[in-house]
Image: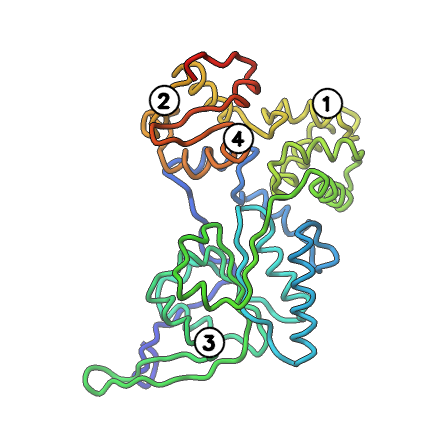
């Protein structure tokens, strides 16, 4: 309780607080994969050194960059803040990086938090009242905001105001505090979990797309230059092809290939070195790892190509259903290797080709 009967619970705000979505009961195994899209401890240090600071340094997402450049220049010409921005898309595509880039282009301070970290309305009030004019507030995993917290955010987004209650019982009354003008940048991997009222309060919504191999190869070359790693173009492209269209994975695989090249090679990464290193780390030509291939082999061989229910497949893999659905299956479906049907999961003809086994007549 704050002084003067104002019902705000104080909280010391720490930038970057909050944990990410764990995707199931076995997150340690899932996240330790070389191709896991989620952020690891090693990624944090790597991201800080490799993360672009300005739009001109940011590779890929060309249309989004062009739109942001126009919006930022127009807002600066008016002496106004940029409309609230929502970035959506799969993990590892650069949503957090773009939020930082926006703040840098505006010459503004950025305050960073996440949906799970803002547990109470008082937590959000403490954050909002500590903002300064023109600041950028970045909320990662914004779809995980508590609904009561979300309602406090509405007037802050629309009117730059904070509604609070003074007093208790019959004597309680609502007063409105003015907030400095700021830009909220939200990031989500699950747009469908955002409530309609919150989604509607973002003036600008961008969905990040997976990167092409050529775009990822450029990112790998840039990262290699920063890390002082000798790499050839065909080596960068080989890493890019196995990175699932995701810069975070490309940088992680670059780091592993670099280590392999230093120990098993001459330190220079070419196509052969990259292919040998990634095969050693069990990342195949499609970017699949051992667990991905095990899923396909179970469907194709053990279950004979017949539809398999989610629970049955999870039991056969000794995994929980949430991890299977949220961590493993999306990329397999994206690559056209697995299909969810009303009767269960089946692997496609492309999956049989990838495994090098004939398609059973019944499938």
- Pick whichever of labels 3 and 1 is earlier in the sequence: 3
- Pick whichever of labels 3 and 2 is earlier in the sequence: 3
Give the Cα separation between the discs numbered 3 and 1: 58 Å
Q: Nearer the viewer, residue 54 or 66?
A: 66
How many residues crowd mark 3 within 10 Å: few (<14), some (14–19), many (20+)? few
- Residue marked by disc 1: 264
Q: Where the C terminus falls, by quadrant?
A: top left
- Residue marked by disc 3: 158
Q: Does dot 2 land on a helix, a strand or a loop?
A: helix
- Pick whichever of labels 3 and 4 is earlier in the sequence: 3
- Residue marked by disc 2: 316
- Residue marked by disc 4: 336
Is residue 76 positioned above or below 28 on the image?
below
Give the Cα separation between the discs numbered 3 and 4: 43 Å
Q: Which disc number belongs to residue 48?
A: none
**Residue found 46% across the figure and 70% down from its top:** 127
Is residue 297 positioned above or below 79 on the image?
above
């Amino acid at each position: 309780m704050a002084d003067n009967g104002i019902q705000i619970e104080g909280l010391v705000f720490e930038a970057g607080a909050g944990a990410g979505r764990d995707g199931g009961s076995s997150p340690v195994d899932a996240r330790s994969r070389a191709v896991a899209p989620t952020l690891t401890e090693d990624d944090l240090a790597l991201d800080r050194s490799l993360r672009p600071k300005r739009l001109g340094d940011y590779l890929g997402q060309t249309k989004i960059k062009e739109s942001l450049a126009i919006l930022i220049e127009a807002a600066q010409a008016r002496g106004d803040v940029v409309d609230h921005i929502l970035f959506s898309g799969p993990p590892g595509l650069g949503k957090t990086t773009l939020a930082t880039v926006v703040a840098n282009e505006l010459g503004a301070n950025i305050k960073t938090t996440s949906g799970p970290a803002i547990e109470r309305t008082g937590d959000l009030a403490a954050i909002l009242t500590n903002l300064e004019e023109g600041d950028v507030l970045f909320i990662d995993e914004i779809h995980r905001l508590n609904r009561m917290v979300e309602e406090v955010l509405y007037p802050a987004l629309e009117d730059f105001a904070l509604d609070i209650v003074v007093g208790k019982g019959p004597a309680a009354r609502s007063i409105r505090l003015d907030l400095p003008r700021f830009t909220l940048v939200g990031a989500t991997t699950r747009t469908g979990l955002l409530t309609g009222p919150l989604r509607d309060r973002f003036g600008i919504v961008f969905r990040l797309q997976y990167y092409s191999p050529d775009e990822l190869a450029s990112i790998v070359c840039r990262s290699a230059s920063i890390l002082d790693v000798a790499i050839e173009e065909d080596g960068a492209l080989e890493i890019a092809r196995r990175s699932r269209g995701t810069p975070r994975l490309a940088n992680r695989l670059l780091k592993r290939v670099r280590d392999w090249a230093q120990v098993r090679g001459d330190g220079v990464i070419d196509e052969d070195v990259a292919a040998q290193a990634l095969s050693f780390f069990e990342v195949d030509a499609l970017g699949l790892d051992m667990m991905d291939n095990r899923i396909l082999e179970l469907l194709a061989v053990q279950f004979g190509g017949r539809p398999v229910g989610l629970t049955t497949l999870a039991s056969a893999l000794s995994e929980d259903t949430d991890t299977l659905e949220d961590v493993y299956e999306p990329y397999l479906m994206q690559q056209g290797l697995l299909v969810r049907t009303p009767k269960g999961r089946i692997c496609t003809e492309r999956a049989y080709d990838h495994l090098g086994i004939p398609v059973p007549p019944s499938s």
